Image: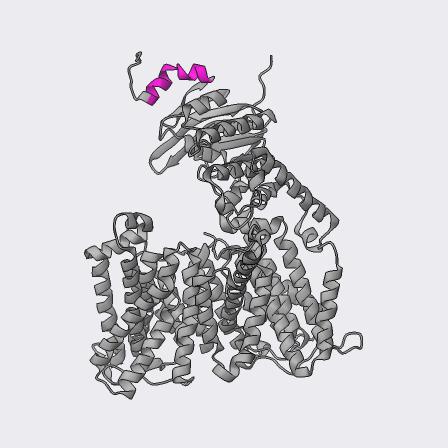
Amino acid sequence: MKRTWPWLLALVLLSGVAFAMGSYQNDVYRKLLLWITLALGYNFLFGIAGQVAFSHFSFYGLGAYSVVIGITYLGWPLPLAILVSAAFCMAVALLVAIPATRLEGFYLALATLAFAQLFIVLLNEGGQVTGGTGGLANYRLPDMAGFRITGPAYTVVIVVLMLSTLAILLRLDRSHFGRACRAARDNPEAAAAMGVDVRRTRILAYTLTSTLAGLAGMVYAFVDNTVNPTIFGLENVFLLLFMIIIGGIGRAAGAVVGAVLLYLLPFVLSPLIGHHHALVFGLVMVLVVLFQPKGLMGVWDALLARRSPVARNHVDKGAKVQAHG
Amino acid sequence: MAEPTPLLQVRGLTRRFGGLLAVSDLDLAVYPGEILGLIGPNGAGKSTTFAMIAGAIAPSAGEIFFKGQSLTGQPTHAFAARGIVRTFQHNKPFDSMGIEENVMVGMHTQIKHGLWQVVLGTAQARASERAARDKARHWIDFVGLSEYAQAPVGTLSFGQGRLLEIARGLAAQPELMLFDEPAAGLTSAECGRLAEIIRGIAAQGIAVLLIEHDMPFLMALAQRVVVLNFGEKIAQGSPVEVQSDPAVVAAYLGQVKVGHA
Amino acid sequence: MNDFLELVVGATASGCIYALVALAYLLITRPTGIINFAVGEWAMMAAFAGVVMLNQWDWPYPVGMAVMVAMMFVVGWMTERLTVRPLVESGAPPLAPILALLGMLVVFREAISIGFGPDPQAVPAAFGFGRLEWGLLAGSYQSFFIIACTLSVFAMAWYFFERTLHGKSFEAVAIDRRAAAWMGIHLGRVTAVSFAMGAVVAGLAGVLAAPNVSAHYLMGMPLAIQGFTALVIGGVGRVEGALLGGLILAFAEQMTVRYAPVPPGLAMGVPLVLLILFLLVRPTGLLPAREGRT
């Protein structure tokens, strides 16, 4: 964390490849980076803070739709649209978090599920503002100071988004806040006895991760230059959930592995099983929960432990699949 | 000689559960640096009193003053911030974290820098983290867990888990530490070590309040004892005084008539 | 007025479907504490079983229903044995079975979508598509059939829980799993039966609803949400709560569609808004659990 050069190196490498790829590959790469960004945030909320929430994609959509509505329907300049959208996402997140975090475990999941569905209903019925079931299209990223950011240059923007999200979440995880989130999840009674304001911690975790999802949404809006309700529905939330559990819950590396695997695998598998990769993922998810709850990272740890006696003493920092309450 | 001011002053503390009066009009004081034992037969209201002083449940009536400030109506997490820290009778570690991190959670109220500094990775935030880790190691050494510091929390024995509870509590820099039957489930060797630790804590000026059923353990350790029965205080004094108090003997033996065995 | 009476039968029938799904949840949640979202997919699977047996193979309705019940019993039992039992026995955290079931939800849905394709398929009604007029109330044969079936199922469920020893053992497990196990109640059996019965009831909901809405591989999730909303409204503590919740939800929905000046699409939001409201304001539901229950 103290040294910035690994981050700069990552930025250069991850951006560099964008310029070496064709436009189709760039498109896949961009979406992959966005999925990784979302998975990182969701992993923090679900795997570290222990909140079973189905609203992550809704904030992704909220960010996307609000920035587009800002520059088209409201005709604002891009910087203003971005600021207002970010504030809006944060406000909605707080509005949901404050009552929802009073609910225990699965009731929180239900409330966020209902919110997610309600969001889709509102998008579908939003008439002119949201473009209804067809969504919004025919817009593009406004030129910034005379420059048009397209193609691989926009991919760099997404790389920056992903690395920033990763940096923020890693720092939060390794801080007193990360410990407070885990403590509030593992044992709220003991956490309160140690001075952790459990409610406030939960609200913060939810609001932070949801706002990050909203920011990612804003970046997403200009990837395909179209937004429509189906993208932000429950299907993708389940996929996100599968990603972090199959990858290894509670660990950033797990989120990355899960996202890369589950996003790219369909491309590889489609000759075999067409669009039905979800079937495979569902099965793998069940197998992971049954046999290796720590996911692929758990498999990796086990392999390492077998190779090296030093690694055997490694304290596993992964999270248990555990809901608070 | 002037009366020393109590660190903790409890007045008229009362707690009802439906129709049951668990604690009734209790007055209690704990002075800085002392070890106070709270005893009584089963159902006397010790655990309820403990829970109220720890901020885990709210009193039905009465006031709790700590360092002159009222704690009545404060949420549980405010108690640690003010300097009252408790351990749990049935160990409650944070299973997903290592021993060091468990203890570092205890330092939550000591952390002064905000989340912005965490996110930006400022020098202050990093220094504060390093200092927290050092302090955690110090407390782990103090309770004697250092050789297990790298072990996963789930592999600790019950006695070691108890030590972790104590280290975690100490990390919160308490001025009053509450122990809920700390000797329960410990071997006699572990009890001896525990007594040493508690004396070491008091020696540092931290007041200790403990509930215990293990009489020899408590009587050897406590400087002052308060006895409850049916939710009321029936005696207080030094261990020797309390042990020969007829009301106390009667309460434990369940007899109205006082006599020699 | 006739308008409203027409509405009453239809809404009651819808409410019964929701109530059945809510009952499916309840049968599973009470003894195990597990919230099984896959009940929606179970309903969907039974609907497709109806497509095959009643439509494609043209079996008589009662035969098809009986086979469906047996089939769903097995599906529920197997789901519990394979994906839930190992987790419960190995002491996994309470979230684990719920996640495994979410995985199964997707598996069920995709399997049906592969087998039957994306288009809606027809399922025959029990007595055809005629209409019945009964006093002031009027509705389709199917609506009355749904109501009759639901009332019978609920009567049986009520009797089971209130009057039979087996039902009491379910209660015991609901109140305190560990204590019940120490008392010798066979936890595995109770759990397996609860899943099996939950699947049967969910399947019933699917087959009864399908003639009106058509069997479609995506029909599971909306049913799951509506069923859960009904459960939350009525309260998890009592069997009657599921029925009450279903009816309240259905009437709220239908009234909104018919009388409120909002576009019909927004009516889909009614169960969601109600769910959110109840979760925030009264998560224990309208009917309190009987004394001695959590």
| Residue C174 on image: x %, y % | 31, 53
The answer to whether any part of residue C215 appears in the image is: yes
- Decide if residue A150 is in sight here: no
Q: Is residue B239 above or below residue B190?
A: above
Q: Is residue A136 left or right of residue C261?
A: right
Q: Residue at x 31, y 50 (%)?
A: C175
Is C7 in front, or is C28? C28
Q: Which residue occupies 42% across, 56% down?
A: C92
Q: Position of residue C276 (x, y in %)?
A: 45, 62
Tell me the quarter of the picture where residue A291 sits: bottom left
Mostly what secondary structure, the magenta segment? helix
- Magenta range is B239-252
Q: Is residue B35 above or below residue B152?
A: above
Asked whether residue C263 is drawn in magenta, I would say no
Q: Residue at x 55, y 23 (%)?
A: B34
Q: Is residue B240 magenta?
A: yes
Nearer the observer, B133 or B170: B133
- Closest to the observer: C267 or A67? A67
